[in-house]
Amino acid sequence: MNIEKFQESMYKLVVETSTKLPKDVRRAVKAAKEKENAGTSAAMSLATITNNIKMADDQVSPICQDTGLPTFKIKTPVGVNQLEIKEAIKNAIVIATKEGKLRPNSVDSLTGENSGDNLGAGLPVMKFDQWEKDYIDVRLILKGGGCENKNIQYSLPCELEGLGRAGRDLDGIRKCIMHSVYQAQGQGCSAGFIGVGIGGDRSSGYDLAKEQLFRSLDDVNPNEDLRAIEEYVLENANKLGIGTMGFGGEATLLGCKVGVMNRIPASFYVSVAYNCWAFRRLGVNVDPVSGEINEWMYQEGDLIDFAESEAEKETAAARANDVITLQAPISEEQIRQLKVGDVVQINGMMYTGRDAIHKYLSDHDSPVDLNGQVIYHCGPVMLKDKDGVWHVKAAGPTTSIREEPYQGDIMKKFGIRAVIGKGGMGPRTLEALKEHGGVYLNAIGGAAQYYADCIKGVEGVDLMQFGIPEAMWHLRVEGFTAVVTMDSHGNSLHADVDKSSLEKLAQFKDKVFN
């Protein structure tokens, strides 16, 4: 095989997967957008999402800044050298990372050190199978941490909140899958997709669940029982009212695929792999001699390019009149005037801070004055030009709940007035917002190009020892839009949606699945 051509093909696969959603996913997003109620936060979110997809297309830049953990599934004819394939894929990953198509996401689990090139022990993940066909089938999924953290595994029989007992039967499986959607809420960047694996052991069950995400959204499950479960869950999960970003609304789940394998008598696992709306998976058919791509997968049908319509532009212009502008640093008085549901635009400085920064700030002084300032839960994709100037290539929010142990204390310690992230935070942070005079702003998860466009300059960076995603970036922004979902008066949209969706989930308790 021409290994240089194969490496080039793998590079193309990585770039396309990171920057362009496949056609079946675009159709699902378009259908969700058309069903959503106009003028709601969910509708605004879907408009931002489709705008972001278009920007990523045009700029050939990552759809979401969290380009995830690259997972390849590879089928090769007999006699193909898999060692050469592994090396070519690793080289393609390094080049794509260097060029800003992937964020450096490989971290040593013991030292916390970022390799900087997405390589490391066990990474990227490559799973090989041999088959009798005469071409190489390579499929790639880039599944970010926010949705990966909402994966869940059930051991039947079990008791489920809102649904009661789930037994070792089809009805118990139904209950587990419905519960998996409920527990994800908006933290996995809903509206999302799920792959479900029934049976196996703990590890093979999760592998089977993730494997379902490689299926086309348009396929039909040949197993009648599984097909019935898929259709039931897809219909009824959207009745939970969780909605896009967890704001409430009509679109909570965009796809459900279920697979099954045998198990041992003592164990019955239902494993669920949750994926965000930015469902980045593609595949290619590669010639085993030339190394060139013969065919792309998941590309049947017309391409939806999501160009903004005139009606959408008019709606956005009208809504802009209701937007509250905040200039950082922000006063407590300004914060106390905000309430859940307000849409704000921030101008001025904001500072990124993820897990490493929050742990650092809990034990040390801040390298910058954060009084009245904004912390952005974000791990951007950054590139430095030949003059040593940093540029933001992608900068959407990360899931905020990971910072719950630190957030309230850090806000009070440093005088921080606003926190931006996605998915909301818990009661400890909510109490601190009320006591201190702070607010939580929910940005649109996955909209990495939309928010990168709001960043007009990188004014500095601190704590680079934690790696690019975890460093504290000083960003100058204009028109950075987000929704108030937790205010200084003790109100939380996330808590409200969780409560209402649990009540709706309970309605499915006794609807026995046949």
Image (cartoon, rainbow, N blue to C red):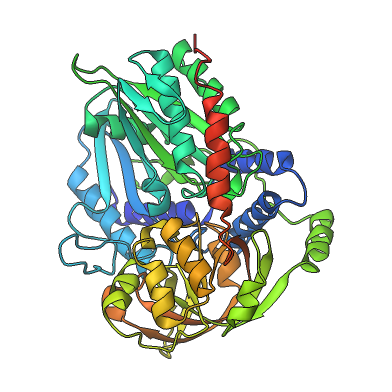
Specify whether 373 is left or right of 200. right
Residue 25 shown left or right of residue 188 in the figure = right
Q: Is residue 478 visible?
A: no
- Residue under the point 23% across and 31% down: 202
Taking the spot 45% from the left edge, 42% from the top edge, the residue there is: 184
**Image coords of residue 510 (percent x, y):** 51, 16
Question: Which residue sits furthest top?
Answer: 514
Residue nearest the observer in this picture, 393 or 428:
428
Is 390 situated above or below 82?
below
Q: Nearer the viewer, residue 408 or 263?
A: 408
Looking at the rendered structure, the number of numbered marks drawn on it comes to 0
Task: State the image coordinates of residue 159 (x, y, percent, origin top left).
Answer: 35, 25
Horizontal and vertical percent position of residue 124: 27, 52
Please identify the quarter of the rendering in which residue 93 is found: bottom left
Q: Is residue 504 above or below residue 429?
A: above
Q: Is residue 341 visible?
A: yes
